């Protein structure tokens, strides 16, 4: 059924599967892929199309990219999830045949969600292909955060997660909390779990002067970058800004919201209904120079992700990016949020927009202390949290999976 590539002189070959973002837009996956290429690996990626990345096949920076038509994101119910995931799995299995023919692969790296990507790898297990589980999201907790309930689908996702860990020869975790999930809930051996943090490549996050066109003449500019979905807490951020403007006297305030997501129209309606439109700019997704220009023009980075079972143990990429650009951070008090930011952030009471507003107000009133916090954050990134510090663990994880394969 599948021709076997057995030439011992070939370099290590990897196929990476991504369902929820196109590549190279998925920054974590792109850093992993390009790092492996730099080490001499042959790397292929299968991802959806979307956000301007609509070419079915191309090679970028040595990475072979195969894309399939973008699925409709599931927002509710088992049927919607089934459609999204079956669409992705069918196309991934279809495209994997072409990758096998064109380049071959020894390891399949599945980047969840969903926790079903091991099914594609299983097709190639008889040919010695191993599965590496790149644990991006705790899917059961993600479902609970989206829909505020557990029930049958939650239990199904717990089962899928167990199967993913069981199928994996090695797993990589985004932080120590995820590592513990792999060991405790996934029952993986500790020596088979490697922490590869989601972190910025600091060379690309240069500190530059603010752009007056972004600031729009405001005294204080807040910056948000990320997905705008059900679980990101944008409603709490809008309420906090309402409190800042109407109750705390900070009317000379502007918020720059960078990103896209299914709840963007709802957030914009909320802003309009509160009469806050003049205090917000929604830029849509920005990349590269445009993203740097927007973030460098902000004074404070905000991360309004509410405290719940998922967010509490998740590392937020936006927090790392704010820190890299020397921005003080305001976020709710989350376990991994503190692990990332330390003294570079203020921590509001869980899911309390009034306290979130108060923390922002304190930074506005104490700019020198906010500047010092920004310095602390940038130092933390350079000293311990940048992508350069994760490279050795990524390569060690691959050494481990190839040792098992042999």
Image (cartoon, rainbow, N blue to C red):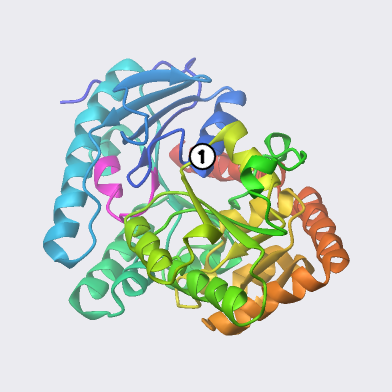
At 31% from the left and 33% from the top, the residue drawn is 49
In the drawing, does residue 387 fall left or right of residue 209?
left
Foreground of the two, 151 or 326: 326
What residue does disc 1 label?
286
Foreground of the two, 75 or 129: 75
The residue sitting at the left extreme is 79
Image coords of residue 64 (percent x, y) = 41, 22
Image coords of residue 95 (percent x, y) = 24, 28
At 22% from the left and 39% from the top, the residue drawn is 123
The N terminus, quarter of image? top left
Is residue 324 visible to us here? yes
Residue 112 forms part of the magenta stretch: yes
Mark 1 falls on what kind of element?
loop
Vertical comparison of 124 with 84: above or below: above
Looking at the image, how many numbered discs can be counted on the residues?
Answer: 1
Foreground of the two, 290 or 34: 290
At 81% from the left and 65% from the top, the residue drawn is 370
Image coords of residue 153 (percent x, y) = 21, 71
Vertical comparison of 95 with 79: above or below: above
In the drawing, does residue 386 fall left or right of residue 343?
left
Q: Quadrant of residue 290?
A: top right
Residue 79 forms part of the magenta stretch: no
Is residue 194 visible to us here? no
Vertical comparison of 400 with 145: above or below: above
Foreground of the two, 172 or 145: 145
At 79% from the left and 52% from the top, the residue drawn is 378
In the drawing, does residue 5 fall left or right of residue 188?
left
Image coords of residue 239 (percent x, y) = 49, 75
Q: Quadrant of residue 358?
A: bottom right
Q: Which residues are magenta?
A: 110-121
In the drawing, does residue 354 fall left or right of residue 53?
right
């Amino acid at each position: 059924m599948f021709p076997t590539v057995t030439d011992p002189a070939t370099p290590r070959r990897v196929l990476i599967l991504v369902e929820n973002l196109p590549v190279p837009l998925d920054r974590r996956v792109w850093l992993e892929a390009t790092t492996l290429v730099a080490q001499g690996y042959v790397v292929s990626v299968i991802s959806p199309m979307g956000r301007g990345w609509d070419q079915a096949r191309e090679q970028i920076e040595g990475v072979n990219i195969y894309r399939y038509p973008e699925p409709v994101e599931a927002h509710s119910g088992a049927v919607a999830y089934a459609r999204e995931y079956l669409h992705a799995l069918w196309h991934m299995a279809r495209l994997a045949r072409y990758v096998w023919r064109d380049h071959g692969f020894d390891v399949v790296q599945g980047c969840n969600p969903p926790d079903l990507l091991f099914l594609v790898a299983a097709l190639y297990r008889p040919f010695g292909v191993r599965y590496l589980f790149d644990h991006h999201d705790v899917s059961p907790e993600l479902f609970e955060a989206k829909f505020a309930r557990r029930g049958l689908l939650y239990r199904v996702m717990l089962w899928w997660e167990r199967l993913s860990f069981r199928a994996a020869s090695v797993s990589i975790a985004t932080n120590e909390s995820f590592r513990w999930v792999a060991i405790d809930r996934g029952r993986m051996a500790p020596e088979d779990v490697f922490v590869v943090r989601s972190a910025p490549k600091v060379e690309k996050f240069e500190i530059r002067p603010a752009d007056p066109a972004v600031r729009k003449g405001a005294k204080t500019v807040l910056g948000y970058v990320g997905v705008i979905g059900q679980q990101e807490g944008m409603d709490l951020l809008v309420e906090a800004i309402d409190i800042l403007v109407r109750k705390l006297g900070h009317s000379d305030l502007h918020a720059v919201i960078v990103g896209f997501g299914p709840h963007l129209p709802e957030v914009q309606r909320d802003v309009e209904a509160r009469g806050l439109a003049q205090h917000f700019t929604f830029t849509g997704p920005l990349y590269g120079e445009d993203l740097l220009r927007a973030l460098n023009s902000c004074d404070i980075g905000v991360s309004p992700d509410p405290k719940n079972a998922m967010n509490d143990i998740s590392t937020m990429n936006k927090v790392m990016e704010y820190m890299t650009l020397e921005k003080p951070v305001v976020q709710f008090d989350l376990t991994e949020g503190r692990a990332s930011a330390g003294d570079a952030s203020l921590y509001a009471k869980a899911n309390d927009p009034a306290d979130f507003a108060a923390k922002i107000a304190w930074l506005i009133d104490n700019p020198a202390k906010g500047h010092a916090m920004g310095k602390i954050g940038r130092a933390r990134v350079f000293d311990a949290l940048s992508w350069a510090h994760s490279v050795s663990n990524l390569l060690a994880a691959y050494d481990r999976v190839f040792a098992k394969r042999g």
